[in-house]
Amino acid sequence: MAGRTLGIGFIGAGLMNRFHAASLTGVRDCEVAGVFSPTRANADLLAAMARDLRVGEPRVHASVTGLVADPAVDALWGACTNDTRVAVVEEIVDAVTSGKGALTGVAIEKPLARNVAEARRILALIESTPLLHGYLENQVFEPAVTRGKEIIWRRAVPIAGRPYLARAAEEHSGPHMPWFWSGERQGGGVLNDMLCHSYEVARFLLTAPGAPREELRVESVNAQIASLKWTRDEYAGMLADMSGGAVDYRRAPAEDFARAAVELRGPGGQRALVEATTSWSFVGPALRLRAELLGPEYAMQVDSLDTDLTVFLSRRVRGDAGEDLVEKQNAEQGLMPVIADEPGAYGYTAENRHMVRAFLEGRMPDETWRDGLAVTEVLMACYKSAEEGRTLSFPVDGIEDFVPAVARGAWRPA
């Protein structure tokens, strides 16, 4: 497909695919060709957004199969809810193998699945076809992260040696949509939702440029989960009101804080550590992404709230709550950070440049569903470690059949 324009079909029309659509203003050789969402009004809004941004003239389809059958659609970007991932991939594969349509590849949002069994199922499905597959982990493509890694590995590592510690964190005050708060639908709480980011960006930083992720072998996992805020009676009531009663944290809570320590072994037997933390109970200006890489004679760090633009609004400047300054914005007054280009800063633009180019060139992207499976295996080991209160050696026995207590509605915070 070299020299062609890649027609992208969006599955899902929520926050993630809105970020993807916005990022395409900075991506060449692609256009939004189609949209499907179970909620037609959301699909219409995303299609209108694509037209307004001049990144495509998409058709709105009534099904995933209809999207695959659209001759203008060459590849799919899947950002459906976690509990529908298996069914959606089954429908894609059935539509392709039965000749209803032809595709080049499918990119799917993190996390790959709710548990290891589901992740292995959808990986087997996609690998039963010739389709290319990309794992949409935007933080691995953040310009600050990739530039910092390039400098460290080019200037410091050849002299001082490999890095030995990566820290990563993602924190905000809670998800937008009710389904994210449901342990059953989402597959857990903040650990499944966001530690997938933190672990993978840390693993990326510790991996030599151009080397496969498999050069680092996981040896052990120790994790903790907790509900620090949202099971308090006041906040559980807020969640119930916000969701129209769909979220009941008094009955079936999910964790709003998680931390993990993952020990890895690199080439030559060198030890490396990942420290990852995530939170839906962070009260600050907005979403905060942090990453650090440390080695024998060097360090790098990234913090998304250390912006090059801030605004101050006095107490007399009052307005409606919104997210016009930064994602997960928590205030409209005071000294506020502003991210001028959120899709770029968070890595969506570079991620989509990479995925589009890989699909057009007929090669696997750098992040594939196999990486998504590897992340899911670590996430499930983290849940099991937290439930058992101990460090687990990796690989973990029985992890393929493990479903976290949070996802079964059986977890109760201490």
Image: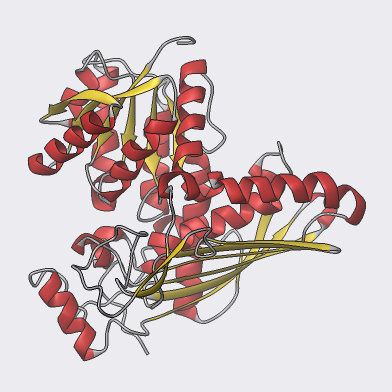
The quarter of the picture where the C terminus appears is bottom left
Is residue 258 shown above or below 29?
Answer: below
Q: Is residue 398 visible?
A: no
Is residue 265 shown above or below 22?
Answer: below
Q: As rendered, which of 42 and 372 lies closer to the eye?
A: 42
Question: Residue 317: percent from the left, percent from the top?
Answer: 25, 73
Q: Quadrant of residue 328?
A: bottom left
In this picture, residue 268 sits left or right of residue 356: right
Is residue 316 shown above or below 175?
Answer: below
- Tell me, what colour scheme is on the image? secondary structure
Question: Residue 399: percent from the left, percent from the top?
Answer: 47, 59
Question: Residue 146: percent from the left, percent from the top?
Answer: 63, 45
Q: Is residue 94 visible?
A: yes
Q: Quadrant of residue 53?
A: top left
Q: Quadrant of residue 297?
A: bottom right
Q: Looking at the image, which residue sits at the far right?
A: 159
Q: As rendered, which of 114 and 402 lies closer to the eye?
A: 114
Residue at image point 30% right, 27% down: 55
Residue at image point 50% right, 23% down: 357
Question: Residue 220: percent from the left, percent from the top?
Answer: 64, 66
Residue at image point 81% right, 44% down: 154
The quarter of the picture where the N terminus appears is top left
Residue at image point 88% right, 47% down: 158
In this picture, residue 193 sits left or right of residue 397: left
In this rendering, the count of numbered labels is 0
